[in-house]
Image (cartoon, coloured by chain):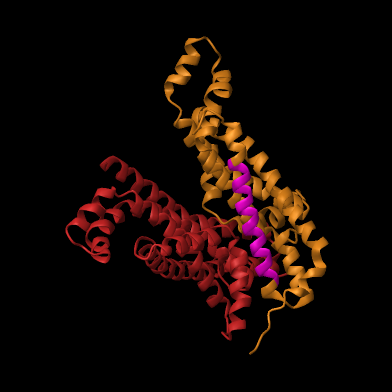
């Protein structure tokens, strides 16, 4: 065989690579922010909404958690236009990632809310504070502090899973790798380098969030 | 554009689902075996085994499965191995499953009180016998629910095999969609079939977990 690995062939694609990196990070950022916000509403609904809303929230969580992300994305990108909802690939990817992350995050946030001692809520009620205000200012901060590490690892998993959006031609990091390897015929080298970039992103994101968590929840967690 | 009735589409998708199940089974058996060896390496001597396993898990859990699949698909031929889509997907999913199961089972072994190691060591049991007669029987009990839960993740992960051209459920869905131009119905059906395969596993894992926490 005598195949010689050649990483030099990749050096001319820095601009393309940075573009892909940006797309991956933006998609992760959008889905993380929207996903966390929506999941707080979802978790509150699943716990103490009216029965129909509770059922709906739980059905949503089960449906998303028991089907593959790639199928959800294909359904949104290829399937929804027949209902008249036409999305660009980037919009479809962001929507699919948000929907996916929200479902997992609802479960996580719900567990966090359940772990807050009931005395906190009762104390708030005893002080005459409205339940919604107690939820937002007393229960929620503690709940999020409880499950912060789990939320972070879910966000990192979403970032890694976002490699799949290359399949609907979103020019993320993986799609850039596809392009580069089709031009250089250096498939293994390209994917190897991009895999290392994902690894660095995953490790970096985890570190960054750990640092932010220490500030955000200072004094709350140790 | 071909117009196919549901009664023609569904059996085709179910054929694909059979390959999804087979691939899941291969990955679970291969991954389970790998994870077991990793577990022995992690807790046995010499100590650097633990570091090596940690690194292995970190790398496989810190990179996208899709890229792992590509690396196997394009890497094995460089070593002179001819790869079929099934082989590539089988190898990649086995590695993926071994890392996740190793991490799950590590948590279960760590949950066994340290006194169990000390006591069995004091009785003169060597590492493998300690594992066989003292640690694993106890760890196995708590390992069942999360392992069943991971099966759901594994079944979903097999969907990526469609990207290297392995004709499992997702690929079958793509093929039918390309022929019929009914993506809404077809991908809806595909999702429903995945749900039918995964939900029982999720449900079992939950019941088992509840039973375990009650018995403690």
Q: Name the residue nearer the viewer: A186 or B25.
A: A186
| Residue A41 appears anywhere in the view | no
Q: Name the residue nearer the viewer: B85 or B204.
A: B85
Place of residue A36 in the rendered image (x, y in percent of width and height, measured from the top left): 62, 38
The question of residue B127 being in magenta is answered with no
Check the image and name the residue furthest to the bottom: A1
The quarter of the rendered structure image containing the N terminus of chain A is bottom right
> Chain B rendered in what hue?
red
In the image, is residue B128 above or below residue A135? below
Looking at the image, which residue is at 41% across and 49% down?
B203
Q: Name the residue nearer the viewer: B32 or A217.
A: A217
Place of residue B105 in the rendered image (x, y in percent of width and height, measured from the top left): 38, 56
Quadrant of the rendered image containing residue A129: top right
Q: Which chain is orange?
A: A
Looking at the image, which residue is at 77% across and 75% down?
A9
Looking at the image, which residue is at 51% across and 37% down?
A147
The stretch in magenta equals A190-210
Quadrant of the rendered image containing residue B29: bottom left
Taken as a whole, is the magenta stretch helix, strand or loop? Answer: helix
Place of residue A193 in the rendered image (x, y in percent of width and height, measured from the top left): 68, 67
Q: Is residue A47 left or right of residue A185?
A: left
Q: Is residue A88 left or right of residue B195?
A: right
Q: Is residue A7 left or right of residue A122?
A: right
Q: Name the residue nearer the viewer: B71 or B112.
A: B112
In the image, is residue B64 above or below residue A213? below
The question of residue A207 being in magenta is answered with yes
| Residue A37 appears anywhere in the view | yes
Place of residue A10 in the rendered image (x, y in percent of width and height, measured from the top left): 77, 71
């Amino acid at each position: 065989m005598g195949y010689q690995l050649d990483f030099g062939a990749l050096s001319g694609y820095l601009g393309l690579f940075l573009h892909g990196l940006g797309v991956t990070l933006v998609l992760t950022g959008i889905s993380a922010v929207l996903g966390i916000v929506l999941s707080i509403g979802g978790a509150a609904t699943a716990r103490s909404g009216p029965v129909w809303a509770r059922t709906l929230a739980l059905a949503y969580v089960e449906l998303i958690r028991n089907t593959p992300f790639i199928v959800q994305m294909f359904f949104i990108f290829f399937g929804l236009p027949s209902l008249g909802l036409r999305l660009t690939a980037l919009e479809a990817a962001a929507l699919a990632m948000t929907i996916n992350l929200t479902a997992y995050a609802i479960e996580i946030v719900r567990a966090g809310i359940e772990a807050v001692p009931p005395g906190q809520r009762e104390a708030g009620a005893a002080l005459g504070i409205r339940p919604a205000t107690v939820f937002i200012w007393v229960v929620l901060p503690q709940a999020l502090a409880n499950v912060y590490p789990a939320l972070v690892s879910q966000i990192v998993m979403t970032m890694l899973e976002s490699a799949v959006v290359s399949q609907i031609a979103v020019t993320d990091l993986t799609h850039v790798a596809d392009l580069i390897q089709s031009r250089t015929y250096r498939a293994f080298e390209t994917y190897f380098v991009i895999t290392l970039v994902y690894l660095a992103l995953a490790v970096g994101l985890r570190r960054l969030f750990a640092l932010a968590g220490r500030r955000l929840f200072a004094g709350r967690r140790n | 554009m071909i117009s196919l009735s549901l009664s023609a589409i569904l059996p085709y998708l179910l054929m694909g689902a059979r390959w999804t199940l087979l691939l899941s089974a291969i990955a679970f058996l291969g991954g389970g075996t790998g994870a077991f060896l990793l577990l022995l390496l992690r807790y046995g001597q010499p100590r650097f085994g633990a570091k090596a396993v940690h690194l292995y898990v970190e790398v496989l859990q810190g990179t996208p499965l899709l890229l792992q699949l590509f690396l196997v698909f394009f890497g094995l031929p460089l070593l002179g191995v001819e790869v079929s889509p099934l082989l590539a997907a089988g190898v990649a999913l086995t590695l993926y499953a071994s890392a996740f199961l190793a991490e799950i089972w590590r948590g279960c072994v760590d949950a066994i009180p340290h006194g169990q190691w000390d006591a069995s060591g004091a009785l003169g049991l060597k590492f493998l016998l300690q594992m066989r007669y003292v640690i694993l029987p106890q760890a196995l009990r708590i390992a069942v629910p999360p392992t069943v839960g991971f099966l759901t993740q594994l079944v979903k992960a097999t969907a990526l095999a469609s990207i290297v051209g392995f004709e499992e459920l997702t690929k079958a869905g793509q093929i039918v969609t390309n022929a019929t131009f009914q993506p809404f119905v077809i991908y809806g059906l595909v999702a429903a079939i995945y749900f039918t395969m995964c939900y029982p596993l999720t449900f079992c894992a939950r019941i088992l977990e509840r039973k375990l926490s009650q018995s403690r």
